[in-house]
Image (cartoon, rainbow, N blue to C red):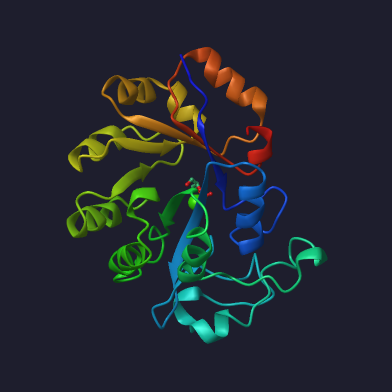
Amino acid sequence: MNKKPVIFAHRGASGTHPENTMVAFEAAAEKGADGIELDVQMTRDGEIVIIHDETVKRTTNGRGAIARMTMAEVSELDAGSWFSPVFAGEKIPTLDEFFTWAAGNHLQINIELKTNKVPYHGIEKQVLDLIEAYNMRGRVIISSFNFDSIKRVIELDPYIAVAGLIWKIRRDALARAKDLGLTALHTQASYAFSNYGKEAVDSGMLLRLYTINHPKEWQRIKNSGIPVEALITDFPERFS
Ligand code: G3P
Ligand code: CA
């Protein structure tokens, strides 16, 4: 039996607002989300910034790789106009800025370390230091497709909440997660429905599913009886 899942707004309320911007995070809170999922990368000068892609091309008016840009360069960019002129002038937020805002609410926070394409040396410690500085430990789950990155987080802070991220159906995911002592996996619905998903649940793994945007999809999952702790959605208003 499924109780009401925790609702995480994927990149903020990204169905209606430009993803991973402060206006998307604020909208997620207004729409009744329980938490926010966001993606972090690191600038050339070591600032943790909230953006999904390794380059700024898709979601800003600029070009270039975050790893090769300074924070000063990143802060010049418009991260809202690509979505709609209504959001012109929105910036790529820093994790610092996000935490300053989050200090005024009680939302859960899922920080995805985007280290699966660019290794961003030292990003795990930088993120953990910020979590500590803003006293956010109890509210944060750190996830990543890069299990080596998760391993580094655990080595630095064995008690922070972490989760392994899985794309589609990975046969070896559960074994890798168990090796690291993980207790939660963030997966797509296809994994949850697979025998691997069943095995994960049977062995006590918590499942959080992305990206569930249609209540009918959630109904199907509920009907299946697969226990799901949380949904990560672009449209938190549809589930709140
Ligand atoms: O954390 C779940 C989901 O956000 C992972 O995929 O590409 O949307 O970051 P992506
Ligand atoms: Ca993500």
Q: Position of residue 220 (x, y in %)?
A: 58, 18
Q: Position of residue 6 (x, y in %)?
A: 50, 34
Q: Where is 204 relative to 230, above or below?
A: above
What residue do we see at 40% from left, 41% from top? 166
Position of residue 217 measured from the top left corner of the image (x, y, whole percent) = 62, 25
**Can residue 141 be seen in this snapshot?**
no
Q: Is residue 171 above or below residue 101?
A: above
Q: Is residue 29 visible?
A: yes
Q: Relative to 222, say whether 74 is above or below.
A: below
* Of residues 192 and 87, the one drawn nearer to the viewer in this rendering: 87
What is the total number of numbered labels drawn onto the structure image? 0
Q: Residue at x 42, y 59 (%)?
A: 114
Outermost residue, right side: 85
Image coordinates for residue 96, horizontal then vertical, percent: 46, 70
- In the image, is 94 to the left or to the right of 60? left
Q: Nearer the viewer, residue 235 or 108?
A: 108
Residue occupying the point 38% across, 64% down: 134
- The C terminus sits in image quarter: top right
Q: Is residue 165 left or right of residue 220?
A: left
